[in-house]
Amino acid sequence: MTAWALAYVRRHSHAWSRVRDWVSWSRLRDYAELAKLRIAVMELVTVAVGAWLGAWGAPSAIALLHALVGTALVATSASAINQWMERFSDRHMRRTADRPLAAGRMSGLEVGVFAAATGLAGFVYLQLTVGPRPALLALLTWILYTLVYTPLKRHSVLNTVVGAVAGALPVLIGWTTVGGQFDLLAGTLFLIVYLWQFPHFMAIAWLYRHEYAAAGLRMLPVIDPTGRRTGAQAFLAAWALVPVSLVPAVSLHVPAWYSVSAALLGLIYTAAAVGFFYRADDRSARRLLRASLVYLPAVLLALSLAPLTTAPYHAGPAAPEPAPQFASHSPQ
């Protein structure tokens, strides 16, 4: 083999090696970590629940699929921007130190390009397929999460108040995708997801309070060493969920089993929050965290079963707007 041929093989073998490394399993895992898949899945569940209830059990499957794809892209972008903005503080926290940016496996430029591409693609996709209202809600979610909540974590304990709004908006993306109007049920769904987040995040923030302090993030437990304010906030939100979750039972006359289920779930969640308020220790925080992971899926599932046993209600989207004709739809 000639020297030229050897040089050609070496050069192209090196290029192929770089491509292979770029698409390796570990690389794909880094992108999955950048997208925060577990959080994204929960957001997509709330989108689906919003669409299901907004159409009262008869959503357009195509419209819902478009909403899920577009929301997933926007959520991926927001998570990537969040990690880019917190790449230095993440290095001080054991639970985040191995993230791709914090660990140095990805560059800021690569993450920035990825975030810009997925965010723009998601917004345009939603605009073209399901219309301006879901697209604008997705954009608002992105703005609140990246430009308000993320920087606010370094300055104020009110960051959770803003972050919870961003966390609850996806349910309205699903709701508006099927033509649902902003009515009592839509507001109830939003409040259920919004209030649920306070005990959930207070438990997480308490368990990792020392790491948050080391990273310079002002979560409530960082400035509340006794845990009294943290526990009080968790309790008040959990307790408020009980009457809020029962609103559909009054306004929609859903089956009695929903009322019983929602009340029981709310009381269990509240009991865990009360335990955390009085004990303010890691054990009670873990118990509250586990209760939160049961409460939201369970109460949303119970409410989602209501359309199967209850006649369509007429307080809001009694006759949902038809899904857009995707083949001929143009940006508004």
Image (tube, rainbow, N blue to C red):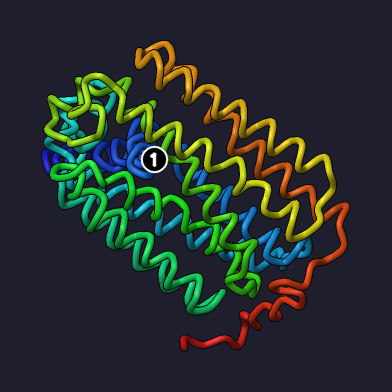
Element type at marker 1? Answer: loop
Task: Indicate whether 90 appears above or below 329.
Answer: above
From the viewer's side, name the closer residue of 71 and 236: 236
**Residue 12 in sight here:** no
* Residue where numbered disc 1 is placed: 36
Quarter of the figure that contains the N terminus: top left
Which picture quadrant has residue 91? top left
**Residue 216 in sight here:** yes
Which picture quadrant has residue 197? top left
From the viewer's side, name the closer residue of 37 and 291: 291
60 to the left or right of 24 = right
Residue displayed at 69% across by 31% down: 264
- The crowding category of the residue bearing disc 1, from other C-alpha atoms within 10 Å (few below 14, some 14 to 19, many at least 20), is some
Identify residue type, mark 1: Lys
Residue displayed at 61% across by 34% down: 266
Q: Residue 156's x, y, as percent?
A: 18, 44
Task: Indicate whether 134 appears above or below 69.
Answer: below
Task: Indicate whether 106 appears above or below 322.
Answer: above
Q: Residue 252's x, y, as percent?
A: 77, 60
From the viewer's side, name the closer residue of 206 and 34: 206
Which picture quadrant has residue 105? top left
From the viewer's side, name the closer residue of 296 and 121: 296
Residue displayed at 44% across by 68% down: 137
Q: Residue 64's x, y, as percent?
A: 64, 63
Q: Residue 193's x, y, as percent?
A: 52, 47
16 to the left or right of 216 = right
